[in-house]
Amino acid sequence: MKNQFKVTWNAEKCPRPQDCGRCLEVCPEAVFALYASNRQEGVVPDEYVIAPALQYFCTGCRACIDVCPKGAITLTPNA
């Protein structure tokens, strides 16, 4: 089965995803993952990114787009 959609997250529009996380909560296919971008041993991270880590499973339901208050997620059909 071919991946039907490309999911993109824009860090400029959503600079602190840990404060929201709505896309993580609403996606029925669990496409998104929250990662600490500045991990260091013994240090609590304070910078995070959202990654469409499992975009292969995206069904195109647009729930993430509808719930994102910053408009930071785009969904593009693959050719």
Image: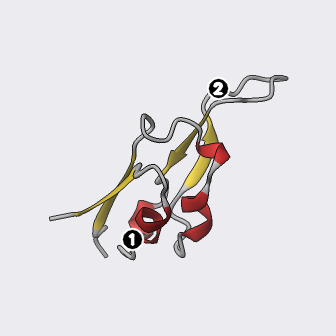
Q: Which mark is residue 38?
A: 2
Q: Quadrant of residue 23?
A: bottom right
Three-letter code for the amino acid on which mark 1 is drawn: Arg
Dot 2: element: loop
The answer to whether marks 1 and 2 mark residues whose Cβ atoms lie closer than 8 Å is no
Nearest-to-viewer mark from 1 and 2: 1
Q: Is residue 73 left or right of residue 20?
A: left
The amino acid on which the numbered mark 2 sits, given as a three-letter code, is Asn
The image shows a total of numbered marks equal to 2
Picture coordinates of residue 56 (x, y %)?
A: 40, 65
Q: Residue at x 41, y 63 (%)?
A: 65
Q: Residue at x 40, y 42 (%)?
A: 10
Q: Is residue 55 left or right of residue 1?
A: right
**Which SS class for mark 1?**
loop
Identify the residue at the far left of this view. Answer: 79
For disc 2, the neighbor class at 10 Å (few under 14, some 14 to 19, many from 20) is: few
Q: Is residue 36 left or right of residue 53?
A: right
Q: Earlier in the sequence, mark 1 or mark 2?
A: 2
Front in this rendered view, residue 39 or 13: 13
Mark sitting on residue 8 = none
Scheme of colours in the image = secondary structure
**Mark 1 → mark 2, Cα distance in angstroms:** 30 Å
> Does 76 appear above or below 2?
above
Residue that label 1 marks: 62
Percent x, y of residue 2: 28, 71
Q: Residue at x 14, y 65 (%)?
A: 79
Instruction: Quarter of the image for the N terminus: give it.
Output: bottom left
What is the x, y in percent for residue 47? 63, 30
